[in-house]
Amino acid sequence: MACPAVVGACVGVSVGATRLRSVPEAYDPLTDPAPAHDLRAVLRIRAFRRLWIAFGLSSLGDWIGLLALTAMAKAFAGDDYQAANFAIGGVLFLRVLPALVMGPVAGWVADRLDRRWTMIVGDLVRAAFFVTIPLVGTLTWLLIATVLIEVVSLIWGPAKDASVPNLVPRHRLEAANQLSLITTYGSALPAAVLFTAITVITRPLDNDLSIELAIYVNAATFVVSALAIVSVAEIGRADGHEHEDHPTLWRTMIEGWSYVTGTPVVRGLVVGISGAFAAGAVVIGLGRTYVEDLGAGDPGYGVLFGAVFGGLALGMGFAPRLFSGLSRRRLFAAGLVGSGIGLAGLALIQQIEIATMIAVALGFCAGASWVSGYTLLGLEVPDNVRGRTFAFVQSAVRTVLALTLAVAPFAAGAIGRHTVSLGGRSLTYNGAATTMLIAAVLAGVLGLIAWRQMDDRPGVPFWRDLQRSFGKSPGVYPATGLFIALEGGEGAGKSTQSALLVKWLEEQGQQVLLTREPGATDLGKKLRRIVLDPATGDISHRAEALLYAADKAEHVDSVIKPALKAGAVVITDRYVDSALAYQGSGRDLDSSDVERVNRWATDDLRPNLTILLDLPPKSGLGRFEERDRIESQSADFHERVRTAFLELAAAEPQHYLVLDASLDRAQLAQQIQARLLPMLPKVGL
């Protein structure tokens, strides 16, 4: 693990980068019906579990090593403020430099060696290098050993990533990669706790001894990791002799540049992701000097380090669910602005206890931006340029991280110590705090730029979206079968696409149920006549909403749930979104009240995918000679309905496929099939 950014960027390498071999025979998917995203199901696979333990130990050791090496570099530099910052900056820069120079070469090497022995030897070599650092005891050897350790890590990482697809079934690969990502960042917190405990216990005896002991503990984690990998016999050499071309850093940046610069959303994502990593890098690069300025020493450094990465893990794990009312684009930009505010707080606060709490908030905001940004890249970028775009982002992140880690400590050292007297009181703001404040302003500006380029809900107040986030259930998704809803305005072609989809699914060997709302049950047929017959006339809007909700309750309990339980693919023509659009936005009802009633009526069951066929109301209504009670509503009513559908899709794009319904029906069917193909239940399982 060369550094957090490098490993975080490389986690996706496992998906699609290596030809999938057969999963170990010991694993039988028939005996493990858990959802594909279930992390516990992945850990039940013995070979992957042992590799994960080894990876976790390596990550833990690498974080401890980062803390110990920066602390030792400062100790070698002595009491000179500038020299200490330069030494720390040198260590951090050299940890990233090999990834910039040797990244493609390391991947090429890892693909041609026996992966299992590459990881075993790599762990033992890293352990040996760490042991030599306190034995030699010079800053020069510390810097040389840092480079050598990172070179080995660059080969170890791709070997691990390329092994994962051979240890887990295809449908659990995403969960395996997610677990690797959580482990990468989550292990920073226990590493910080261990480092703090070691320094607190041994510091009264000898401060140098406490740092050396931390380095020896780090080396021991690599040895144990190697022993764990010995037992994973399923890892071997890559199949075949054909190998993908690994582009250089320069070539990757050139190929991705044209697409990135020409697409506002992607441009905003790249700028924002780079800014988020730069904000975190400033804290890493200046943290050791910053806590020394506060008089907290090595224990304070460990606490601050753990606070930042603990917050980062919390942000990645909980921010999307906690702020579910925000679209991913808004969450991404808001997290970046929040990171800037957190950095400003660290720069201005001169008390370690408060700074620690701010560091948790800063990490949370950065984690929210990180996970939202990478998810958006996967959703927004077309498949034919996605690989190059991700490679460009990875290169940009590494470059920004390297520059930040190098420049920030040197800038702090150049600024030096300064004391300001105000009203008889003196305030000391050293170079670390001043540099953090400058970085905070830059992060805030980048966040605002990203917001302007990416905001998908212009005119909708941010605070209103934020209020919607709290108290909103994330919903329940089917554990068996597949639930698909087709939504859209009048005349959008839902019935046509439903029929085409049923035919295609049956050709794939799927058990299919096509249903609709309202009218799929005996009760529903009676309710349908009431709400759609023009003879019904005007009725209370609340009564209308309740009639639709009653139809949904009966529909879900008697039709949809039994079919899903049997493993069928259920396609419904209209679902809850129609109620939110027609009764919530079309009528004069409070959307939150309509949503509450309909979520209760459906037991909060959500579709795995909602296909929204978007068509201007004028075009859709022109397809009807006669209109029912809803179709005959005003043009303004139908415009509000269309806007509501699009807003619902923008809020949770991962669960929607929005299509231009004016396209040829065959083109629409192909796009729907392409999106659904990887989601289909395994036939015969």
Image (cartoon, rainbow, N blue to C red):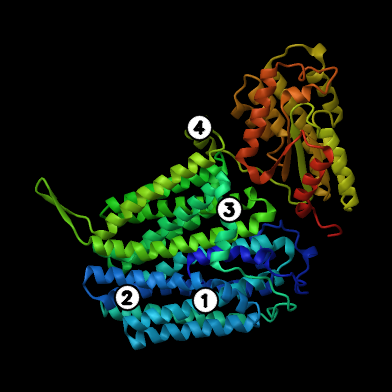
In the image: residue 301, left or right of residue 568: left
- Mark 3 Cα shell of 10 Å, populated few (<14), some (14-19), many (≥20): few
Residue 472 horizontal/vertical position (percent): 58, 38
User: In the picture shown, does residue 509 fall above or below 449?
Assistant: below
Q: Mark 4 or 1, which is nearer the eye?
A: 1
Tag 4 residue: 464
* Residue 266 seen in the figure: no
> Which badge, 2 or 3, is on the more N-terminal residue?
2
Asked if marks 4 and 2 touch (Cβ < 8 Å), the reply is no
Find numbered disc 4 in the image and state the secondary structure of the residue it sits on.
helix
Distance from disc 4 to disc 3, alpha carbons, whole Å, reads 36 Å
Q: Position of residue 206 (x, y in %)?
A: 26, 80
Residue sitting at x 79%, y 13%: 536
What's the residue type where badge 2 is placed? Ala
Mark 2: few/some/many CA within 10 Å (<14, 14-19, 20+) = many
Q: Nearer the viewer, residue 369 or 309?
A: 369
Name the residue that disc number 1 marks: 153
Q: Residue 170 appears in which quarter of the rendering?
A: bottom right
Quarter of the image with the C terminus in it: bottom right
- The residue drawn where x is 54% and y is 63% is 8
Which kind of residue does numbered mark 1 sit on? Answer: Ser
- Circle 1 sits in a helix, a strand or a loop, which is it? helix
Q: Judging from the image, what secondary structure is the residue with disc 3 in?
A: helix
